[in-house]
Amino acid sequence: MIKLELKNLTKTFERRVIFRNVNLDWEAPGLFGVAGPNGSGKSTLVKVITGLISPSSGDVKLSVGGKTYHPATAIDHFGFAAPYLVLYDEFTAKENLELSMKIRGLQLDEKYMDELLEHFSLIKRKNDLVRAYSSGMKQRLKIIFAFIHNPALVILDEPTANLDAEGKEKVYLLARKVAKEKIVIFATNEEEELRMCKEVVKILDHKPAERAA
Amino acid sequence: MLKRALWLFNKDLTSELRTRYAINALAMFIVVTISVILFAIGEEKISTALAAGLLWVVIFFSAMSGLSRAFVSEEERGTNIILQLIASPTVVLTGKLFYNLILVFAMNMVILVLYSALFDSFVLKNVFIFFFSFVLGNSGLAFASTIIASIIAKANSKGTLYPVLSFPILLPLLLMLVEITKRCADGVAFEEISPEFFALISYNVVMATASYMLFDFIWKE
C-alpha cells in the first residue's frame, strides 16, 4: 500500500502566502496532477512534498508498505524530476545514474537502467558526458533519474519541458506504466497531461480546490 | 551511512580531478603567496617565531581560496538539489568533510614541503609534536571551513563573506598552531605545550559537534 497524505499544508515566504491549507489523500495506483497558473505555487508544493523546502505549517506523510515516512526520512521512496534540476555535466549519463544509486546506498539494476536508457533513446549516448547533451536529452535523463531507484512516489514537475513529441510520448508511456502500481504526480499546465490524471488539485488564489478529472 | 558518504566523497574527488575547480586556485595561491613572502624578505634573516607565524598565514589564506568550493560549486551550478534528493544532510556533510580533509592535508603538505625547502629559518627541533599538531590543525581547519562554506554557499556575496566569517572562527585555532609551531622550533618538551595541544583537540571536537548539529538547518532551504 502506497499513500500520500498532505494535511493543512501551508507555505509562506515572509508575508506572501504561496498556498494555504492544502489537503490531499492520494493512494496508489494512480497518476495524479497538480495544476495552476504560472506563479501559483505548483513547484513550491512539489518541493515541499519531496522535502526540498520545509512547509510553514502542516504535514506531509508518505506510507509505504505499512511504514509512514516524512520527507526527511523518505529520500529513497521519492523520485523527482524538474527542468530546474541540474545533473553533473562533468559525468556521463551512466555515471550520474550510478552515483545517484550509490550515494542513496542502493544497488543499481543495470538491466533496468539500460531499459530506461533504451526507452528514452539514450542507450548509445550513455557514456557521453552530460555537458554534450542537448536540453531535450538532459530532460530525458532527468526523467530516468526520477525512476531509476524504483521509488514508491514519482513527482514530475513540468515533465515534458524541452521535449519533442516523441520524447513527450515516451514520458507518458513510462508514467502510465509505473502509475499502474505506484503514485506518479504531474505538476503541469498541459491539458493533455492533466487529462491522463485520475485526480487533479488546482492551486488558485492560494486556496486549493480538488476536482476529479 | 559511511559508505554513502564515501561515494559522495568519491564523486567530489572525481569531479575535482575533471574540472579542477579548487586545485588550480589552490596551487596558484600557494605559489604566489610563498613567492611574495620570499621577495618581501629578500636577504633578511627572519626569526623562527616569524617563520612559524608566516607558515600559518600562508595556510589560512590558501584555505580561504579553495576550501569553500565543496559547497559553493554545488550551489552555483544548481546541483545542490540533486544532493538533497539523494542524500541525507548527515551523508552530505560527512562526504564534504572527507573531501575537505583530503584537500586540506594535500594542500598543507605541499605548503610545508615548499616552506621547509625555501625558508632557512624554519627549522623544527621537535618534529614529532609538530606532526601531531599539524594533523589536528588540518582537521580543525577542515571542520571549520566545511561548515562555514555550507553557510556562505547560500549567500549572494560568497567571496567576501567566507574570509569574514572564517576569521573569528579560525583565529583561536591559528593562534594555538602558531604558538605550538614556535615552541616546536625551539624544541620544547610535550609537557610545556600540552595545554595548547589539548585545546587543539577540544577545538576539533567542538567544531565537529557544532557542524553536525547545525547542518540540518543550513542545508534545507
Image (cartoon, grey):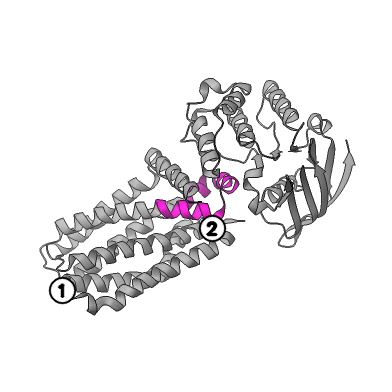
Disc 2 marks which residue?
Answer: B155
Image point 19% across, 58% down: which residue? B115
Viewer-nearest residue: A101 or A206: A101
Q: Picture quarter containing residue B137?
A: bottom left
Q: Is residue B113 left or right of residue A121?
A: left
Indicate the amino acid at tag 2. Ala
Crowd class of label 2 (few under 14; some 14 to 19; many from 20; radius 10 Å): few
The quadrant of the picture occupied by the C terminus of chain B is bottom right
Picture coordinates of residue A18 (x, y %)?
A: 76, 54
- Say whether residue A206 is visible: no
Picture coordinates of residue B218 (x, y %)?
A: 56, 60
Q: Residue furthest right?
A: A212
Of helix, strand and loop, which mostly describes the magenta segment? helix
Answer whether residue B134 is magenta in the image.
no
Single out the mark in the foreground, 2 or 1. 1
Q: Circle 2 — which element?
A: loop
Image point 36% across, 73% down: which residue? B172
Part of the protein shown in magenta: B71-99
Viewer-nearest residue: B111 or B41: B111
Viewer-nearest residue: B159 or A144: A144
Picture coordinates of residue A26 (x, y %)?
A: 81, 44
Disc 1 marks which residue?
Answer: B186
Mark 2 or mark 1: which comes first in sequence? 2
Is disc 1 on the same chain as disc 2? yes
Q: Are marks 2 and 1 in contact (CB under 8 Å)?
A: no
- Gap between marks 2 and 1, in whole Å? 43 Å
Q: Is residue B172 above or below residue A186?
A: below
Indicate the amino acid at tag 1. Asp
Image point 19% across, 76% down: which residue? B189
Subunit bearing disc 1: B
Q: Circle 1 — which element?
A: helix
